[in-house]
Amino acid sequence: MSIRQTLRTSGPIFLPGDDGYDAYRRPLDPALDPHPAVVVRAADATDVRQAVLAARRHDLPFAVQATGHGTHRAHDGALLLHTGAMAAVLVDPVRRVARVGPGARWGDVLRAAAPFGLAGLSGSAPDVGVVGYTLGGGLGWLSRRHGLAADSVLRARVVTADGRLVTADADRNPDLFWALRGGGGSYGVVTALDIRLHPVSTVYAGAVTFGRERAAEALAYYRRWIERVPDELSTAVLLTRDGSLVVKAMYAGDPDRGRALLAPLWRVAGPAVADGMRVVDYPDAAMGGVSPRTFDQVRSLDDDLVAALVAEPDATVEIRHWGGRIARDRGAAAHRDAPLSVILDTVPSPRTATALDRCGLGSAFLNFLSDPARTASAFTAANWAALRRVKAAHDPDNVFGAGLAVPPAAVPPAAVTASA
């Protein structure tokens, strides 16, 4: 039986040469040119189940794509499940919960929640998919105040490797629930997420631009200043290719208080060339980030690292403050204790690489990672081992092994003998 005959889906199916195949096979990254064996555009959870079972029946690799932001490898010869049509968003303002489909984007959620004075823990761009971003951890401008997006997941509906549709929450499949909240898409296809919304309507946010002359002094001050700021304030300092120093900030509170907190940092970095800080509705406060070619969390920002970053040729550098609620939550996602991260949009100079080796943790963050070989670096050793055990329990054949995947733990020979 052919793959088209096997797939009894309500959503369309595209084989090579069909109209629509090229449109749905392409990810966001223009460098990738995948040629899957078949593309299934799912309309509902039943279609997802059909796709998983068909891939197993025909021994095809399996991959999932919604917005295309998280695709880092061409899935040639695979069954590619496209979930972009499953974009429903339902907001319960009383419970402060949004149920989102796997094709929903953050802009959809923010627009639906805003009339109730609520917001989800979105990232820097409204067109990013909610589910992929959240499963990968989800670091946003409200994370110091409310935690990573993964920590606000309340429930997931998941199609597992054997084609079952299950619920994962604190009471049902709790191990799967723990792994999904930051462990990525290695455990099944999420068909719906219930996420906690937070009472945020307006914020004081934007960016202030300075010359580069006092960049070293500003960064030296910044590393001390962040120890005293409240969780409601999130900041990042950028050294841009045009020779500017930019302080980006969001304060989820009274704008006068936010301006007073930021003023000492601005005085050290100043005088300002441009001031873009303003009170804005949270859905309109998205501030784009730096595309990470190099990412590391750092335990300290010492003088040598500061000097190296300031002198970094032909690069945009972002130093971002973590901490707050991120460090207090203890979910699967991320190395929680790092106070700062450093992102470069290029390969660092030898001087910067040496300084990062000394100050950095050598850790990644799943949302900022593009190399599947480094997936383990996005987790602590204990969480990586636990994630592999959950993987072995729910997907021992590694059906969901595409992209930034967690491999199943090996089953000890004694365990095999005992269960035989």
Image (cartoon, grey):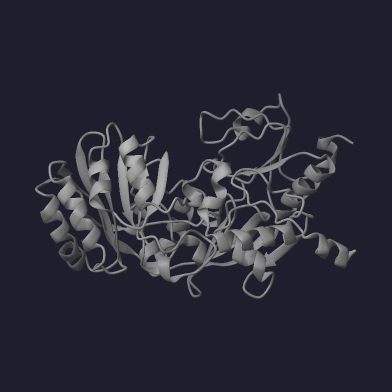
Q: Which residue appears at 90% of the width and 63% of the height?
A: 420
Left or right of 384, for residue 233 = left
Image coordinates for residue 401, horizontal then vertical, percent: 68, 46
Relative depth, front residue between 45 and 369: 369
Relative depth, front residue between 271 and 67: 271
Location of the N terminus by quadrant is top right
Q: Which residue appears at 49% of the width and 49% of the height?
A: 367
Q: Which residue appears at 36% of the width and 41% of the height?
A: 353
Left or right of 326, for residue 53 = right
Image coordinates for residue 33, horizontal then vertical, percent: 59, 28
User: Total label count?
Assistant: 0
Q: Is residue 293 above or below residue 34?
A: below
Which residue is situated farthest in the top direction here? Answer: 17
Left or right of 395, for residue 353 = left
Q: Is residue 151 above or below residue 319?
A: below
- Residue 104 seen from this side: no
Image coordinates for residue 330, horizontal then vertical, percent: 49, 69
Residue 253 location, quadrant: bottom left
Relative depth, front residue between 363 and 31: 363
Q: Which residue appears at 71% of the width and 27% of the height?
A: 18
Q: Is residue 35 above or below residue 88?
A: above
Image coordinates for residue 363, horizontal then vertical, percent: 46, 52
- Residue 412 seen from this side: yes
